[in-house]
Image (cartoon, rainbow, N blue to C red):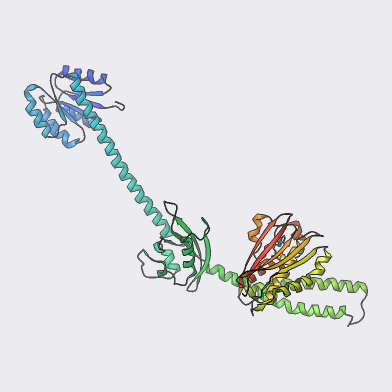
Amino acid sequence: MSETCNVLVVDDEKPIREGCERVLSGKGYDVLKAENGQQALETMARQPVDIVLLDLKMPVMSGEEMLEIARQKYPDIPVIIITGHGTVDTAVECMKKGAYDFITKPFQIDQFLITVERAAEKRKLEQKAKEYREQNIRNLYDLHLEKSRIKTIINCMANGVMVTNRNLEVVLHNPALMRLLEKSHEIQNPVPVTEFFGDNEPLIETLKKIQQGKEEHGVAVSQEIHAGKKVLRAISAAAPGPDDEIAGTVTVLEDITPFKQLDQMKTDFVNMVAHELRSPLVSIRQLNNVLLEGLAGPLSEKQQDLLQRGLKKIDTLLELINDLLDVAKIEAGKYIQHQAPTNIDKIIKETVDLMLPRAQEQGIHLTIKTTNLKPVKADPKAIEEIFSNLISNAINYSPDGGEVVVTAEGLGEYIEIKVKDNGVGIPQEELPKIFDKFYRVKHPRTREVMGTGLGLAIVKAIVENHQGSIDVESEPNKGTTFRILLPAIV
Ligand SMILES: Nc1ncnc2c1ncn2[C@@H]1O[C@H](COP(=O)(O)OP(=O)(O)OP(=O)(O)O)[C@@H](O)[C@H]1O
Ligand SMILES: [Mg+2]
């Protein structure tokens, strides 16, 4: 036997008790002894007993009496009755009352050992079964506890949580979601997601795409949605099932209305300041021009030089102000006024012509190549803005003597525009940020160039307002290529 097994031998005859002890301890059992039923019960109350060997005829308390009590108190402990030939009937009676087996005196050692071993085996199996049962109950309890813990966390979260299944039905939501969506009535899950959001809510489209695996694996999709007067940020991701397929979606919603209001206040303030600065600056520029043209009397060379330098600074400032106002207009959706069939070819050539002097100043070779172009539905002023920003960046961020190539090509339903330079390039990790407002890459070259980091934000907004797309490829010290696709009129 691998584990210890305590056998309690209950017999009033000392030789039997000791004989049993000898045989059993030789086989690895731990043996306890008692002279009668009373003593046996006391032992059982004191220490663990696995098997009882019980004589029937004993003084103080007989085996039968003890068996009855033991069956009630310790129903799991097998009791083997020791019986003489004369008491076999009683032994059978005892079996009916719950004894496990009986052996007759005088013992046949082999038989005796087999019986005890069987009882020990039964005891072991029953104990294992009991352990499993208890463990199972504990596991269920833990599971239940874990479930209620998660439920408490989700219910106490300040952010709204919504989980959908494969059919886009909501299977879990929390009170915060109801608060954010201003829903007062109880909703019993599962319900279609349209129960929470209107049919036209873009979030539903996003959830559909995630469910169909059309969004990049493992990437959360962030979007702003409106709920009454509130603006919410919804971050949605796929919920993987056990088979690693998409089992549903999880969305976390946060109220960002205060941030939006703050952002609006900031934008209003910047607009107001920009606007208020522009008129006096334009006047100063005009007055300086009057002076420069000698309309207020002749100027010395020194005076002319100073005025010219002043004018350059005023122009830079005016450019910044115009950029700020452009961004404000784009964000308010008021930038693109009239979209009409527009000839890109002409705009590129005019913009490049305007840029040529600057390029030449830096010894940069600026070339254009257009092929197969079709007109696009666009606002010419906005398209010009795209080219002037990209070409001016290409010139600004290239060393003297560099090369800038502008190409535009009709590709079926699209026209593809590329502005390629062999300048300083942009590190890979900076690429996603360069289209953000006011973002400038930290590079010695950027510090040499006057700029505010608004150019590319404007370009991207214009391209997107024309249902186009923009991307960039770049390698530090090798060069950068911006590529724009705009829908052509076919
Ligand atoms: N062709 C390019 N080559 C290398 N870096 C570039 C290029 N174009 C843009 N960048 C980087 O991206 C940043 C953002 O460009 P963006 O045109 O938005 O702003 P800017 O040129 O700094 O200022 P401005 O608002 O006057 O255009 C730049 O500061 C520069 O670091
Ligand atoms: Mg720029």
Q: Position of residue 324 (x, y in %)?
A: 68, 72
Judge whether 424 appears above or below 124 on screen: below
* Nearer the observer, 44 or 324: 324
User: Quadrant of the rendered structure where residue 468 is?
Assistant: bottom right
Q: Residue at x 39, y 56 (%)?
A: 151
Quarter of the image where the C terminus is located: bottom right
Q: Left or right: 213 with respect to 338?
A: left
* Nearer the observer, 347 or 10: 347
In this rendering, the count of numbered labels is 0
Q: Position of residue 285 (x, y in %)?
A: 80, 77
Q: Position of residue 28 (x, y in %)?
A: 28, 22
Judge whether 248 appears above or below 290 on screen: above
Q: Position of residue 63 (x, y in %)?
A: 12, 28
Q: Is residue 449 visible?
A: no
Q: Left or right: 151 with respect to 293?
A: left
Q: Left or right: 130 with respect to 241?
A: left
Judge whether 185 appears above or below 113 on screen: below
Q: Is residue 167 visible?
A: yes
Q: Left or right: 150 with respect to 410?
A: left
User: Quadrant of the rendered structure where residue 377 is?
Assistant: bottom right
User: Quadrant of the rendered structure where residue 454 is?
Assistant: bottom right
* Nearer the observer, 404 or 70: 404
**Ligand 1, what quadrant?**
bottom right
Residue most toward the bottom?
295
Quarter of the image where the N terminus is located: top left
